[in-house]
Amino acid sequence: MTVDSARPTPPTAARRDIVRTHHGEEVTDSYEWLRDKTDADVISHLEAENAYTEAMTGHLEGLRTRIFEEIKGRTQETDLSVPVRHRDWWHYTRTIEGEQYAVHARIAVGDSPERPVLDAGSVPEGEEVLLDGNKEAQGLEFFSLGVYDVSPAGDLLAYAVDTSGDERFDLRVKDLGTGEVVDEAVTGIGYGSAWSADGTYLFYTRVDDAWRPFQVWRHEVGTAADADVLIYQEDDERFWMGVGTSRDDRQVMIGLGSKNTSEVRLLPAHDPLGEFRIVAPREEGVEYDVEPAAEHLWVVHNKGHRDFELAVAPIGSTSADDWRTVVPGEEGVRISGVDAFSGHLALSLRREGLTQLQILPLSADGRPVGQGYQVPVEEEVYSIETAANPTYDTDTLLVVIESLVTPSSIYELDLVSGELELLKRQPVLGGYDPADYQQHRLWATAQDGTRIPISLVARRGVSPDGTNPGLIYGYGSYEISIDPYFSVSRLSYLDRGVVYAVAHVRGGGEMGRGWYEQGRLEHKRNTFTDFVAAADELVTSGWVAPDRLAAEGRSAGGLLMGAVVNLAPEKFRVVHAGVPFVDALTTILDPSLPLTVGEWEEWGNPVASAEIYEIMRGYTPYENIRETAYPAILATTGLNDTRVFFVEPAKWVARLRETVTNDPAERPILLKTEMVAGHGGKTGRYDAWKETAFEVAFMVDQLGATETLTS
């Protein structure tokens, strides 16, 4: 990497000391003032950081353009999804070359129930456009849908729009016959919606000041918002909620959950003015999900086993005492969900770090018959999951299968025979051939002897000779698994000889509930040491050169990045921390901030517990920056992010610059803030590709891997 040493010096944030006392100890924070985005000095500082970042990466403009063109050139810009039947319509989305957003459309089923075969290059005959994202987003810097819900009769569309990135949405109802918006009275809602059976009422959620969905409201279409009725309010700040409709269209569902406990409430969709009933009262430590299906409730729960089991109960059940076990729990085999259809169940599992799909046939009275079968996948590392399957009465199922080398593939599964038919594989242009790449499952050994799975992909011909550049990605929180997936933009790494790996560290859910429990609360440090062990394995196995390893993580994975660069900065050449949770202790100490109270079950409560306070203070990135050489660091964030406030990376970067001994010309510490965006970054696909190209260019430049292997 070559950078002009005469480039401007890094911005320096003013020190405005704030002193707080925690468990009898005074703590000084010099950069907490950066939290207020209404402060002109804060905005000026962020703009100065952006200008510095652009100056320090200006030499990469040509490389960024090439990578953007690589992503664009591999993408079939005019394309459409596999049509999915819902009620009397085939629904799909189309993308159009040059347009940022998808077009949502449908075709009437008519006399033929067969799935239509559509041509991506032309407008399908009989198409009805329900929502054109490009028209909706016209003139906006940010556009995101939070609700997209067609009424049971198919004549109305409820959709909700966020135009700033703060994930607060304005609700609109569109008459699909006239194309007119007939209702836009409700604003500032959260995610989720549900129609009454007659399409007269809409149920939606609202968020509190801490951005927690805590209320469900009922809105009569065409009336003023102040006439809406509050249906339920959740006052326990640990609990989030969502609202939706069951697959068989018979039930409106309210789901409530903390990190440890859940509760589900149901209301017949034909009785929108009625009272919701509780399926099973919440019991501390018991989590359950419900799939209503005709006269049964299918329940995935952990009441009897930590890796969950499948039970069935009568549709009117109001107690866990009614749950009858159908598939018992098995240690290390995590039952993650069930999709119920008129004649079959699709049970989602994970075993040995890989997802599985088990199909169970049902008898005429809705009871499981036999052991069913597992849907086969013939790859070493892969992901399999159910796709959108909104139709209850069906004998086929859409399934998504992909891997690190196989693009996302939609199959139709014959539920009776078990036969798979490929309907669509994500097009990858430019002569992509999976045979040109290799994927492997490696295992690292953690400090305590635990085996940590690693998914790895590289160009065919790249060998573990100890010379390769590499990138290792990690997350490791909330029982979220980073399952193997295909990425077009990742090819810009692989084709430059970069070995790409995902470390499936504890705190995620890849290896079952125990895997999660070993990486949360007082065991959180395992997440970080597992990642370092995985990095060491890439080097000792020869896949990556010791001085050419990059690391990347986003959100809670950004906390992982901040922790590991404090723990072992010498192991990484460059790090990208996206929307990083690097000031976690400050956030978790302040219950007035968004998400904090609900997070106490994930990280612990440092307000109430001096022990938890000390544990967190021992690993949180902002508190543990050292005076030493660090990797080059790129921190990216969005000004309107409500999940991880922009102030966290802003403070982190400011404090890093106080102590790091890096030559800023060679290993810069950079902050890049999108001034109109939230947690997910830019929304238009071309804008998102440019953002990705910026990040990839920075990383490969630091790794000395800017040229493709074929050039």
Image (cartoon, rainbow, N blue to C red):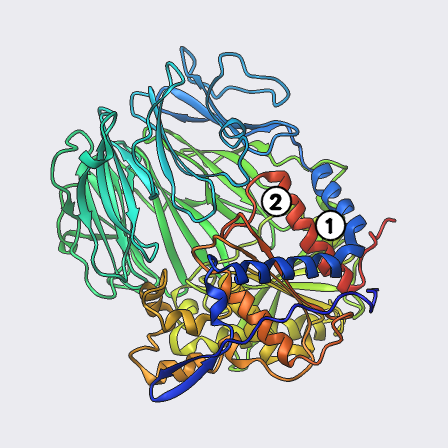
The answer to whether residue 11 is left or right of residue 430 is left
Q: Nearer the viewer, residue 413 or 607?
A: 607
Quarter of the image holding residue 370?
top left
User: Extreme bottom residue here?
Assistant: 24
Q: Amino acid at mark 2?
A: Ala
Q: Amino acid at mark 1?
A: Ser
Q: CA distance from mark 1 to mark 2?
A: 15 Å
Disc 1 element: helix
Quarter of the image holding residue 191?
top left
Q: Report the mark closest to the observer, 1 or 2.
A: 2
User: Of label 1 and label 2, which has the lower sequence position?
Assistant: 1
Q: Position of residue 224 (x, y in %)?
A: 23, 30
Q: Which mark is residue 688?
A: 2
Identify the residue at horizontal 74%, vertical 72% (top origin). Answer: 664
Q: Position of residue 423 (x, y in %)?
A: 55, 30
Q: Is residue 19 above or below residue 104?
A: below
**Residue count near mark 2 (Cα–Cα under 10 Å), binned few <14, some 14–19, many ≥20:** some
Can I make out residue 611 in this image? yes
Q: Nearer the viewer, residue 571 or 171?
A: 171
